[in-house]
Image (cartoon, grey):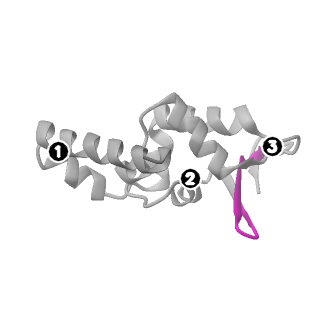
Amino acid sequence: MKPALLRVFMRLGNLIKSLLQYGSSVGVAACTRKTGEQLKQDTKLMNLLRGAVTAIQDENGWSRLSTVGAHISNQASFDSRNYGYANLSGLFEAIDSFEVDRRDKTIYVRSKQKGKNGKKTA
């Protein structure tokens, strides 16, 4: 079996196990989209996202989103759908602490830079 397909089956198995263990409250939480402000208040999430972006950024601070996702998967059990976002790019776009840049078919992300006055700039 291909590794990608195996990961899908493992995630599906974990989801079913969670639903059986915690009941329908898991399904409700997964459908509720959190706002950017709510996401920013989640210290564990923000540390995970910032840490992943910082760990693999290039000299200009940009990181490929696919590599960020792989790094996060190696650090923790994470699924953007738990925050109400179908994909990781949507989650990053909702948080104004990050810049998202789409170049051709590749998505890049970086932390927003702070200007001389201490405020974040685009």
Q: Which comes before the other along the chain, label 2 or label 3? A: 3
View extreme (bottom): residue: 104
Q: Which comes before the other along the chain, label 1 or label 2? A: 1
- Give x and y (percent) for residue 70: 58, 41
Q: Name which quarter of the figure residue 103 lies in.
A: bottom right
**Residue type, mark 3 in image:** Gly
Nearer the observer, 113 or 60: 60
In this view, the mark in front (1 or 3):
1
**Residue located beneath label 3 in the image:** 61
Relative to 16, say whether 35 is above or below.
below
Relative to 115, say whether 44 is above or below.
above
Disc 2 versus disc 3: distance between alpha carbons? 17 Å
- Give x and y (percent) for residue 96: 61, 54
Number of numbered discs present? 3
Nearer the observer, 1 or 88: 1
**Residue type, mark 2 in image:** Ile
Residue at the location (63% across, 43% down)? Answer: 68
- Viewed as shown, does residue 29 lie left or right of 49? left
